[in-house]
Amino acid sequence: MSTPPLPRPPLAPRHWPAWLGIGLMALAARIPWPLQRALGRGLGATLRVALAARRRVAARNLELCFPELDAPARDALLRRHFHALGIGLFEFARAWWGSIAPLRRGLVVEGVEHVESARAAGRGVIVVSGHFTTLEVCGRLMCDHIPLAGMYRPHSEAAMEWAVRRGRARYAAAMFPKRDVRGVVRHLKRGGLLWYAPDQDPSGGDAVYVPFFGRSAHSLTSTHSLARLSGAAVVFYRHVRRDDGGYTLTLSPAPAPYPTQDATADTATVIAGIEDMVRAAPDQYLWIHRRFKRQPDGASLY
């Protein structure tokens, strides 16, 4: 099965702290959207102070990726990033447990024809994006237009695992456990769509070093492998939260030819595409992740 059946919610006392957090998120999902944006910016400012270690990681990432910016400009970008992160937490809650009707107003969707043409030719489509603060809510918004499936990492806390799967079941066409490669390939061979984000430094799996903002970045070759195994097309998916509160979702084909026989070259193509997405909305990328954790020479950039 592509999506394991949802079990009964775990209600033992040891799960009650998690349920308290889930309940608070469900309540937060029902706050009016303009107020959520304002509260999100305030929450982000608080997180910037409270999460000192993550703030240092984000600041270092910005220093590595935007050396052309002076210190005040990078600090301003860091502040905007934490504002975006705070808003993103409310977006996650709304995507799982709230109404996205207010977010559909002013929505701009571009490039759906690239997915439709691949499907008309009998091909599945790997919809490649990155880890942005907007990923969950924009995934739900895009599901209004194309039937996206996704992959997920099982959560160690059973209550949170249940809640996340229950939330995503509201809009995702299917959810595949991270290691269910066979299920993913079958889905793509049948003409299905898969949202995929291969941009974080992986702890396992086949990976190579390719450039990201001019730095060596340890990157999964999975997009290349899935495309070769399934015959699926690869389409890039950029999603941006605009200053007016609306969203712009853009689909565009990966540069041809893709895939090739060269896993490193194909991975470089994918990571370059994600870099272009980041440059379109640099405050909205998840800079608190240690993207350059592993380096070819074993040195630490953090």
Image: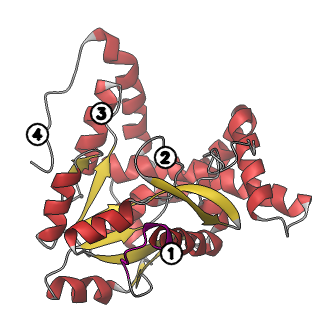
Q: Is residue 263 magenta?
A: yes
- Of badges 4 and 1, the one in the foreground is 1
Judge whether residue 216 can be spotted in this image.
Answer: yes
What kind of element bears circle 3? helix
4 or 1: tag closer to the N-terminus: 4
Whole-angstrom CA distance, mark 2 to mark 1, is: 18 Å
Name above or below for residue 236 compared with residue 72.
Answer: below
User: Which of the numbered marks, if any, corresponds to residue 150?
Assistant: none
For the residues labelled 2 and 1, say whether their Cβ atoms are less than 8 Å apart: no
Q: Quadrant of the C terminus?
A: top right
The residue that disc 1 covers is 269
Q: Amino acid at mark 4?
A: Pro
Whole-angstrom CA distance, mark 4 to mark 2, is: 28 Å
Q: What scheme was used to colour the molecule?
A: secondary structure
Q: Position of residue 270 (x, y in %)?
A: 48, 71
Q: Amino acid at mark 2?
A: Pro
Magenta highlight range: 258-265
Judge whether residue 35 can be spotted in this image.
Answer: no
**Local crowd size for mark 4, using a 10 Å CA cut-off: few (<14), some (14–19), many (≥20):** few
Q: Amino acid at mark 1?
A: Thr
For the residues labelled 4 and 2, say whether their Cβ atoms are less than 8 Å apart: no
Q: Is residue 151 left or right of residue 62?
A: left
4 or 3: tag closer to the N-terminus: 4
Residue name at image x 37 percent, y 65 percent: 223
The residue that disc 4 covers is 5
User: Which of the numbered marks, if any, corresponds to residue 161?
Assistant: 3
Q: Position of residue 117 (x, y in %)?
A: 23, 89
User: Which of the numbered marks, if any, corresponds to residue 202?
Assistant: 2
2 or 1: tag closer to the N-terminus: 2
Whole-angstrom CA distance, mark 4 to mark 3, is: 12 Å
Whole-angstrom CA distance, mark 3 to mark 2, is: 21 Å
What kind of element bears circle 1? helix
